[in-house]
Image: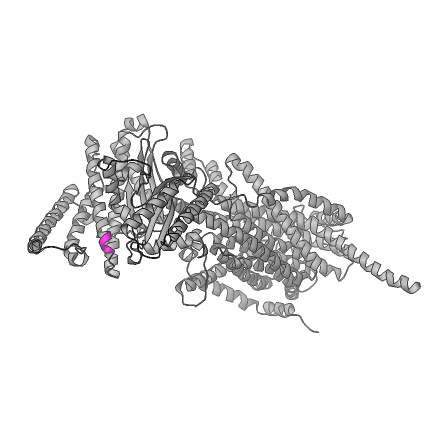
Amino acid sequence: MKTSATQRFSRQVIARAHWIVLGWVVFAVLCKAFSPSWKQVALDGDFEYLPATQTSVAGGKLLDEAFFGTRARSQMVVTLSRAEQDLTKTDRLIGLDLLRRLYHRLGEVAWQRAMQLRDDSGDESINRWWVVAAQAFDQAIEIDSQFYEALGDRVPETSPTPYEPRMAIAYWDRGNLLGSQMVIQPSTAPETTAATSDADAETEPDKKASSISETTARVAEDLEAALVLDSDLPMSVLPISKRPLKDWEPLLDIYSWEDRTLGSQLKTPRARLAVLTLSSELAATGNIELLEQLQEIVDQTVAYSHAYLTEEERSDSGSPQLIVTGSAAIGGQTLSAARSAIQYTEWFTVVMILLLLSIVYRAPLLVAVPLFSIAIAVMVSTAAVTFLTQLSQSGLVPGLDIQIYTTSRIFVVVILFGAGTDYCLFLIARLREEAAQSPWPVACRKALTQVSGALIGSAMTTIVGLGMLWFADFGKFHHTGPIIAVCLSIGLLVCMTLTPACLCLLGPKVFWPTSAGQVSREPRIQLIGNRSVNDKDSSPGDLLWNWMAIQLTRRPMVTLLIGLALLLPPAWIGFRNERTVTYDISGQLSASASTRQGMRVLDREFGIGQLAPISVLMLSEQPMGKEEQKETLQTITQALYQTEGVTAVRHRNDPLGDFPPDREMSLLSSEAWRRRALQNHRLTQLHFVSSMPQYANRLIRMDVIIQEDPFSEAAGNSLKRIEETIAGQTAALGQAGLQIDAFYAGTTPSIVDLREVTLSDTFRIKLAVIAAVFAVLVLVIRRVALSIYLIATVLLSYYTTLGLTYLFFRFLHGPTFPGLDWKLPIFLFVILVAVGQDYNVYLVTRILEEKRKLGSLAAVRRAVARTGGIITACGLVMAATFISMTASSWWPWITQSLAFLTSDSAASLGEQIASQPTTLRGITELGFALGLGVLLDTLYVRTVLVPSFVVLHDQWRKSSSSQRFQRPNRSSTD
């Protein structure tokens, strides 16, 4: 007798069970040992993965080239503020203490960077970093003197440290920096550009000797001062090259309210700002550690204030708010919350599956086998993708383009655990049936043979559906879907080899305390119905599914119409609000998160647009003269000020944007002197003037300040008006013979591009997923009409789920609800359409199998009765794994409420949980939506809509066939 491929495969698996188990275990251990961890190779962010053709990407690339090594991509801002009153004198003390520590850290980082550049490549930019280091130490020492003077008789009676009460380490570092510059001066000193006369040349050696003598004296003074302040300093401080400053590498500069020229823009009566400019993107993974390091400095400042302020001083006015915020801080806290959410999800997924399997089987080994199989699948699949990612990043394999992201792990773990458990449940359920009729090895082989087709078919809908994300333009979508598909393929292979091998080796005792062919008769919840419709000796669960199978197919038209009527209203709401989404990155965190509190301070005191300007880059084809640059800049600036929504324009001649064209100013006024000082300020030159020769006299940079939130649609509309204004000006300049191209960069242009790309991807991916899943359904069940209907039911389920999710979170958040997270619709669609078809495939393939032995109606009833319990169990498992994605939003609060703490400590814990979030709103929303969607598919669509349609469709086919048969008979009779 000819055997099928699945029969041959099943025989090989059962015959080589020992080797299969051993092989998977050894392979998993090797993968774990030699593959990098997910954290080591994972990327993150959003804007970095936009297509290269987008406006913001082109602008960012130009900024990188023109301001190489000095471009600030993000920032962290430390706010010192009070909400209801002006800052006090004691608040100023806290602020000065903070600034002296920050400026000293900047000096350390700049010095270490200069040494690395000198050692690595002798880069010409090392001079700039020597200067930054020296000026930072100068500022730290100057502010330290102000702090100590203001401290007065409050100096705590404690042993001195390198940082307290005086910054002894700042003197020590400045002295050593000057000393090292004296040694390497010939290679690092900036070259003199001005011509000198012969007389000047004669006095040059004397000037150099005098300069060396002054520097030597200054070095001695600084080192002596450091030793006076802390005599143990040489023993307690590491050399600059050995200090652990890796987390601070992105730090470029600091400007604060104490800066003589820029400071006025960074203070109000109720707030002060210290801005740390960073070279890292706002969602760089390193921002987590940098945020922790900066928060440590803030905490040290607050802790020391308790040493020099009396209880009376602290109680009279209360403590000011000292909060770290800014784009990079929000990005760091978001990534930290994502990691926390991943940990919660993984643990709760395991716990939920353990509980559900225990309820379903009440057999320890039947709980252990699926968990063991899925653990192996997770280890191997994650190791495989991290290994491939490392190869891709190293460039050793040409054409290999694989990237993984921090949040991708959530999908991998959840889908692997959910789908893997489903595969094991179906295999075990079929094994129970076969074991009652055949010897154990034969039963194992038959069970695997019978379910292989359904498992492969259902898995292929998910794998192919997720793989369609490869056609997305947005990099995060483009890579995430195929990665999950690869992991699920490995999971399927494990469940079709390792799981049956384990079951075969364990033997019938795997069902202990029941036997393989005996089901417990205890009155409990029975999820697995495996009896025939007419079996009188059935459990309550069997009787329930038998009754439902009969009732649902007795009046199929009524069942179908009522089922559709209940889903259509929420589906319409989902369809209407599919694009009601938010792209606000800060909105991922709860409103009580510390970084969002800081953003509210910025918005209240300074306007949020001040720290998120739109960068406009004007690049001419040919170098421009100074007068031509000045006239061009003045013309464009004047036009921008007349554009609706623009509040200020910063540029080289007006770095703070507080001298608009219509403002009159005397040449000798203090304002004029301040403006000239600002134009020559170090930060102005670094920010607005390119140091790269190819852009000299060709590039004009402007920062346009708008009044709207940079993440809002209103900000996007303002950008559109700015682009129209710039286009009109460049066209006029082009007619005058000056060809200029305009580029845009910043948060708002990136958000606009992200919205455009993801909306385009969503439409394209929807079509691709539908087509791919439809093709798989046709191949598996070979019924075109039925395949179309199954696709339609899942689409209806998607829009219904989306509508219910939107209504739930709008009710939860109230009037402040900005919309669902922008990633939710696409991931919900792909996963729900792909995963939701699993249960349809299981049911329909069983109906087709039963039709070979029974009539159409009896086959439907028997298939519903025999698969109802197992599909329900699978759906509950999958829904539970998705809902575990929400655990990080509610479990910390439950832990707090259950903890045996005093009321004071419980309140303190609550404040800590609120300010340091453990979840992201987008993950919570997506977990809720996916869990709801799977439950809807399992308990309603598969139970009500699919059987009723199959019966109606078979009745229609039978009626059509009988009519075609009767017509020829009538013709022959006539």
Q: Position of residue 128 (x, y in %)?
A: 24, 52
- Quadrant of the image occupied by residue 802: top right
Q: Position of residue 934 (x, y in %)?
A: 60, 49
**Horizontal placement of 377 versus 237: left or right?**
right
Q: Position of residue 715 (x, y in %)?
A: 45, 42
In front of the other: 760 or 482: 760
Q: Is residue 447 visible?
A: no
369 in relation to 339, above or below:
below
On whether residue 125 falls in the magenta region, the answer is yes
On whether residue 382 falls in the magenta region, the answer is no
In front of the other: 359 or 510: 359
Q: Is residue 910 visible?
A: yes
**Dominant secondary structure, magenta:** helix
The quadrant the N terminus occupies is: bottom right
**Horizontal placement of 622 versus 366: left or right?**
left
Name of the residue lying farthest toward the right: 974
In magenta, the rendered stretch is 124-128
65 in relation to 665, above or below:
below
